[in-house]
Image (cartoon, rainbow, N blue to C red):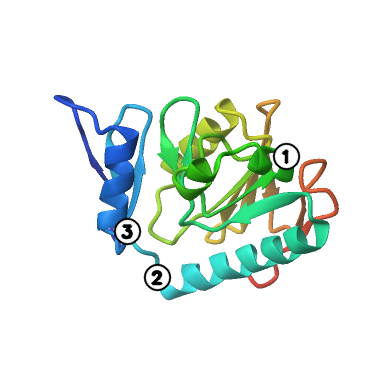
Amino acid sequence: MPSPLTIHFDSFKLTDNQFYQLCQDNRNLRFEKNAYGDLVIMPPTGGLTSNKNLRIIQQLANWTDKDGKGIAFDSSGGFKLPNGAIRAPDASWISLKKWQNLTMDEKEKFIPLCPDFVMELRSKKDDLKPLQEKMKEYIDNGTKLGWLINPQDKKVEIYREDKTVEILDSPMSLSGENILVNFVLNLELIW
């Protein structure tokens, strides 16, 4: 699988509406836009990574339904961050209050805020550094808790709003701490 492809836009910038329409016109492709306005084309993952991501999202969605205090999103949901980037984390969550404060138009397009929680799952071919930079970007823009799950090395990097990064070796579960209260992600199916 190839790495993400970045197309630089030095002579003009896509507006948010143009970028949204580009995504709608090309639903078989997965795009992000970085803070500089460059287009990032994300390749599809392989079956193993896709299944691992599904298992993570399934657990998050089940907990979200029981908890009732927020809304969970899969990797196809785009968020417009305060720095102007439009990102689609592999899994994310926002509080119900934030969701209810959005207009219907904001809910239907790229959500104009940074998620409270994000998760990125490293694919076998993904370089680690760009994912770490993306996690830092989420935190810098308002994410309170983020997990970078790295199955190849059986490590998890935990990002928090206080900017400290904690690295865990082969954890069997992760706690949602005070952001996803009482959520525990089982990693046995991921390793």
Real-space CA distance between mark 2 and mark 1, rounded to the nearest whole angstrom: 35 Å
Name the residue rendered at 54%, 32% in the picture.
136
Real-space CA distance between mark 3 and mark 1, rounded to the nearest whole angstrom: 33 Å
**Residue 158: image x %, image y %?**
67, 42
Real-space CA distance between mark 2 and mark 3, rounded to the nearest whole angstrom: 9 Å
Identify the secondary structure beneath mark 2: loop
Amino acid, disc 2:
Gly
> Which of 77/128 is in front?
77
- Residue at label 2? 46
Q: How many marks?
A: 3
- Residue at label 3? 43
**Residue 15: image x %, image y %?**
29, 32
- Residue at label 1? 97
Left or right for 178, reference 130:
right
Of labels 3 and 1, earlier in sequence is 3
Left or right for 134, reference 125:
right
> Which of 10/151 is in front?
10
One can see residue 191 in this view: no
Identify the secondary structure beneath mark 3: loop
> Which of 61/22 is in front?
22
Mark 1 and mark 2 in contact (Cβ < 8 Å)? no
**Residue 108: image x %, image y %?**
48, 49
Residue at the farthest right position: 182
Identify the secondary structure beneath mark 1: helix
Name the residue rendered at 34%, 35% in the picture.
16
Left or right for 121, reference 146:
left
Instruction: Bin the neighbour count of mark 1 within 10 Å (Cα to Cα): few under 14, some 14-19, many 20 and up.
Output: few
